[in-house]
Image (cartoon, rainbow, N blue to C red):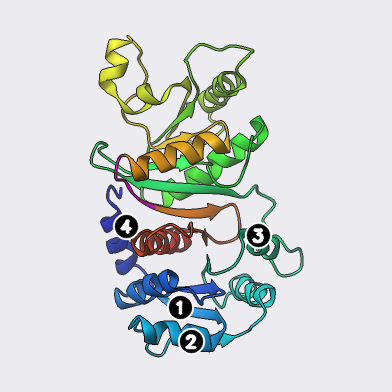
Amino acid sequence: MINKLDNLVEAAQKQTKMKLAVAVAQDKDILISVSEAQGLGIIDAILIGNKEEILDIADEFKIKLGDTKIIEILNTAEATKQAVKMVSEGEADFLMKGKVDTSILLKAVLDKDFGLRTGRLLSHIMVYEMNSYHKLLFLTDGGMNIQPAIENKKAIIKNAIIAAQGLGNKEIKIACLAAKEKVSSKMQATVDGAELKRLSEENYFGDGVIVEGPIAFDLAISKEAAKIKAYTSPVVGETDIILVPTIEVGNGVGKALTYMAGAKSAGVIMGAKAPVVLTSRADSSETKLYSIALGSVIAANM
């Protein structure tokens, strides 16, 4: 099981090198992270976009691209379409968002003719490493699904399980986040959490998966808090995946971990034929590198 993001990079180095298609690649931080990933032997990149801009950025910031393949397509939508096609047709193993709106990228990913549709729900997964927790913590979904109903939460959990298994997790413990542990019809998160726990107990999510819910954040990550509150569960203090009830909760928790707890992170979209590396414009090149490594390891295991 991978417990550090640097170990994730090491795992990506040891496996078969994956091919990454970057949609609209003319972005400094994207090119820095791609160059570093190539230098570490994680990927071979294919850059699609404005070749002149890509080379100008590389020259200005001394980014080593070497003989990286660059496909010139000036139109943003067409460049994105080409990147998606390359993954769909097996010329690349996974996809990364460059200087393109997420809506344009997802439209291409979901295209019926050339996209990466699987029939599964797409969901965003962040993986966090912080000094205050003893292993990687997966958080989903703070980036795509706004207020998922129970059926969507089932799909979001399944996507997160695939990602966690890709990182070597054999036993996966999932906390369905809510404000309290007692079920209340006035709080949908508690109702859904209890139902997801019941499904897990019936092996709906497969062997080795334990779902607890509803459960508050402190109990999910702190054995001491659970002891004080006399709450028992195998998930307590050992949570691998936190399922949030809404996008606002996921966004808030994730940014609090990053900006207040100093967490390192990586992020991908799951549910398509291949992982889609999607990071924020505010994310560092380090986060983008870790995200490439995450996408690479998951792609190899898919």
Above or below for 66 versus 111: below
Judge the density around disc 3: few (<14), some (14-19), many (≥20) Cα neighbours within 10 Å: some
Determine the CA span between mark 1 and mark 3. Answer: 20 Å
Dot 3 or dot 2, earlier in sequence: 2
Residue 286 in the image: state x and y as whole percent. Answer: 33, 62
Which residue corresponds to the image point at 45% horizontal and 53% vertical from the top-left? 267
Badge 1 density bin: few <14, some 14–19, many ≥20, Cα 10 Å: many
- Name the spot of residue 73 as percent of width and height, x first: 63, 84
Residue at the far front in the pictured view? 60
Up the image or down, 218 lies above or below 296; here it is above
Kindly identify the residue that appears in the image at 60 percent across and 76 percent down.
Answer: 86
Label 2 is placed on what type of residue?
Answer: Lys
Q: Tell me: residue 199, above or below residue 241.
A: above
- Dot 4 crowding, Cα within 10 Å, few <14, some 14–19, many 20+: some
The residue to which callout 3 is attached is 106
Q: Do the residues labelled 1 and 4 touch (CB within 8 Å)?
A: no
Which residue in the structure is indicated by mark 1?
45
Residue 63 versus residue 119 in the image, above or below: below
Q: What stretch is highlighted in magenta?
A: 261-265
Q: Which amino acid lies under the numbered mark 4 shown in the image of this protein?
A: Leu
| Separation of marks 1 and 2 at Cα, in angstroms | 7 Å
Q: Mark 2 points at which residue?
A: 69
Q: Residue 8 carries which label?
A: 4
Mark 3 and mark 4: span between their CA atoms? 26 Å
